[in-house]
Amino acid sequence: MKKSLGFTLVELLVTLSILATLVTLAAPSVAGLVQSGNVASAVNTFLADLRFARAEAIRRGSAVVICRSDDPEAASPTCSNTSARGWAAGWIVYEERNGTGGMGSGDRLLRIQAPLNGVDGATSTKNDFTFTPLGRSQSASGNVVFGAEMLEQRRRKVCIAFTGRARVASDLSNSCDA
């Protein structure tokens, strides 16, 4: 009897068809994990910059602003609100020195966040958050929702309270006031 040194064509085809079926079943799950990871990363980056802005306002004894920017990596970035991607287009953090209410001459740029990759959008009714030297939000509380509307279960809401504290809501239906 001759010793077999490999696979038969039938064995190879059966193995490849089983592998193809498993990959087809697993691909949507992997894509969902990647999307969830991208949203979580964006939320963590935003929270870190909010906390940085609040801490800098306290440390410097002056107002610090985090605002949306359509081109945060420009030579002279400015606050804006025209991008359809919202906060996902990027943002800047600066120390408000001239009191004009927008990044201008005399203000000190502290941090830049480039556009977020893998996040379809980040919507909010507010285009900026200003922290006072006491660490409080200068205006009413607000929120930012990260993720596309069609992927409801992967979206995350960041709530910014009047006290300046930022947190992630347990789900989108929860109010930020709780």
Image (tube, rainbow, N blue to C red):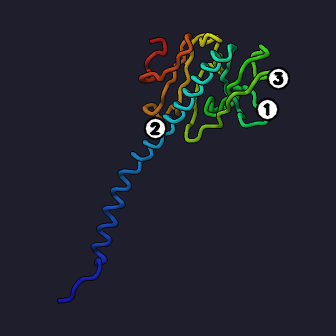
- Measuring from the top left, give residue 142's x and y in whole percent: 57, 16
From the image, tell me which residue sits under label 2. Answer: 36
Callout 1 environment at 10 Å: few (<14), some (14 to 19), or many (20+)? Answer: few
SS type, badge 1: loop
Question: If the image is split into quadrants, where does the N terminus sit?
Answer: bottom left
What residue occupies the far left of the structure in this picture? 1
**Residue visible at 51% across and 23% down?**
158
Q: Mark 1 or mark 2: which is in front?
A: 1
Residue 25 is left or right of residue 119, and the answer is left
- Closer to the N terminus: mark 3 or mark 1? 1
> Residue 105 — which label?
3
Q: Mark 2 or mark 3: which is in front?
A: 3
Name which residue type carries label 1: Ser
Instruction: Classify residue 77 by image quadrant.
Output: top right
Callout 3 environment at 10 Å: few (<14), some (14 to 19), or many (20+)? Answer: few
Name which residue type carries label 3: Ser
- Measuring from the top left, give residue 11's x and y in whole percent: 27, 73
**Residue visible at 24% across and 83% down?**
4
- Measuring from the top left, give residue 42's x and y in whole percent: 54, 34
Instruction: Classify residue 97 by image quadrant.
Output: top right
- Closer to the N terminus: mark 2 or mark 3? 2
Question: If the image is split into quadrants, where does the C terminus sit?
Answer: top left
- Measuring from the top left, give residue 7's x and y in whole percent: 29, 77
**Residue visible at 55% across and 10% down?**
163
Count of residue discs: 3
What residue occupies the far bottom of the structure in this picture? 1
Give the spatial CA distance, label 1 vs label 2.
33 Å
- Closer to the N terminus: mark 1 or mark 2? 2
SS type, badge 3: loop
Name which residue type carries label 2: Ser
> Residue 76 — which label?
1
